[in-house]
Image (tube, helix red, strand yellow):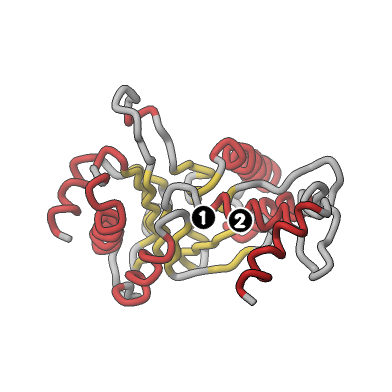
Amino acid sequence: MAKEENMQPMQHQMMGYDRAITMFSPDGRLLQVEYAKKTVRQGSTAIGLVCTDGVLLVADKRIVDKLIIPESVEKIFQIDDHIGATASGILSDARVLIERAQVRAQQHRVTYDTSIDTNTVVKDVASLCQICTQSGGLRPFGVSLIIAGIDADGPKLFETDPTGIFFQFKATVIGEGEPEIDEILAKEYSDRLTIQDGLILAMGALSKVLDKNFSVERVDAAFITSKDHKFTKVKRSDLEKALKKK
């Protein structure tokens, strides 16, 4: 039975069901979309947390070459003053989605003279991802985004995936460390966490998952406070302090 289950994906590939994004396999699957989701699971880890005083994003930059300048690698992006995002998967795909979100936020500000809400940005990004699951000649975006922002009614945290679906979370993780860190968040996350507490939790989770490969240089982090609605990158010295407190 197990042998037959292992052979099924291979049979689908031999029959060409993974050659066109618009072609469903006999059991109702879009194989290229599933491949894109596997790409996300192989990407570097990214974490998002809703805290009492704002939202926090922490990501592994996965620097494997000692000659790379760590500061030149960006894993967390500013979309607007009050919105930020991180990604896992093919980061070149993420850049396209992030730049689209940045333009959307700028257009909204110029048109309405007010800041865009996080949910609108998420829906716009997810809609583009969905179009790429049903249009011939395209491929799905091989990336998932965690988008965090502060709206009029408080902090918001969303996760999108290559299918174009999105969910709102209190805390979430994507990438290669998802199974282990998701378990840690389920046990240790609390609605009472401050941004500082969240940073300690995220740094501890990353260090546990990466083990010997972990270093502060690999971490990119940013937060947006509910008080001033300003996107701020976390300094390396603050990351080191949080690591010592874990």
Image position of 30 (left or right of 45): right
56 w.r.t. 138: above or below: below
SS assignment at label 1: helix
In the picture as drawn, the residue positioned furthest to the left comes out as 244
- The x and y percentages for residue 171 are 42, 67
- The x and y percentages for residue 242 are 19, 54
Question: Dot 1, how many residues are within 10 Å of its Cα: few (below 14), some (14-19), or many (20+)?
Answer: many
127 w.r.t. 2: above or below: above
Q: CA distance from mark 1 to mark 2?
A: 7 Å
Q: From the image, which quarter does the N terminus lie in?
A: bottom right
Q: Residue at position x 54%, y 46% from top? A: 89
Q: Nearer the viewer, residue 10 or 27?
A: 10
Q: Amino acid at mark 1?
A: Arg
Q: Residue at position x 79%, y 70% from top? A: 27
- The x and y percentages for residue 128 are 73, 49
Camera sees residue 101: yes
Residue of label 2:
37
